[in-house]
Amino acid sequence: MLPDMESLQRLTAIVYGLQIASFFFGITFIAGVIVNYVKLKDVEGTWLESHFRWQMRTFWFGLLWSCIGILLFIVVVGIPVLMAAAVWVLYRAIKGWIELSEGKPLDL
């Protein structure tokens, strides 16, 4: 039995919340992307799929830029890279959450 759209929409909002909470508890970023991969099949072909893809890309690119920032930390350039990555992740989580609350899919 497939979950109904309302519960999937709530789950999508929870993942956005986990992404934002990762600024205080880093592990929630990983928990959110795990939820995305586990429930991806349930949202395929719906407008929520765009949110799941958005959230997964936010995770992977956020992780990539964070790793680059950590590597560049030695030469001090990493500090602005890490700050930019944090702002970018926060922007994407907030933008996605707003679009979700308005019932809109995201343009990928």
Image (cartoon, rainbow, N blue to C red):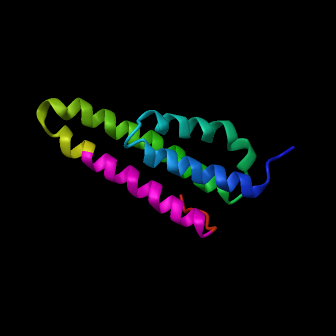
Furthest-bottom residue in view? 102
Tell me if residue 73 is in the magenta stretch.
no
What x and y, as percent, mark residue 74? Answer: 15, 29
Kindly report the secondary structure that dominates the magenta region of the rendered protein: helix
Q: Residue at x 20, y 46 (%)?
A: 80
Furthest-front residue in view? 24
Is residue 35 visible in the rendered structure shown here?
yes
- Front residue of 35/63: it is 35
Furthest-left residue in view? 75
What x and y, as percent, mark residue 7? Answer: 72, 52
Tell me if residue 88 is in the magenta stretch.
yes
Q: Is residue 82 left or right of residue 36?
A: left
What x and y, as percent, mark residue 93? Answer: 46, 54
- Front residue of 104/28: it is 28
Q: Residue at x 18, y 33 (%)?
A: 73
Q: Quadrant of residue 25?
A: top left
Relative to 97, is 86 above or below?
A: above
Q: Is residue 42 left or right of residue 24?
A: right
Is residue 45 visible in the rendered structure shown here?
no
Q: Is residue 29 left or right of residue 12?
A: left
- Front residue of 53/9: it is 9
What x and y, as percent, mark residue 60? Answer: 46, 39
Q: Residue at x 33, y 47 (%)?
A: 86
Number of marks drawn: 0
Relative to 88, is 106 above or below?
A: below
Q: Residue at x 69, y 41 (%)?
A: 39
- Give the residues in magenta: 83-102
Q: Can you say which quadrant of the picture contains the N terminus?
A: top right
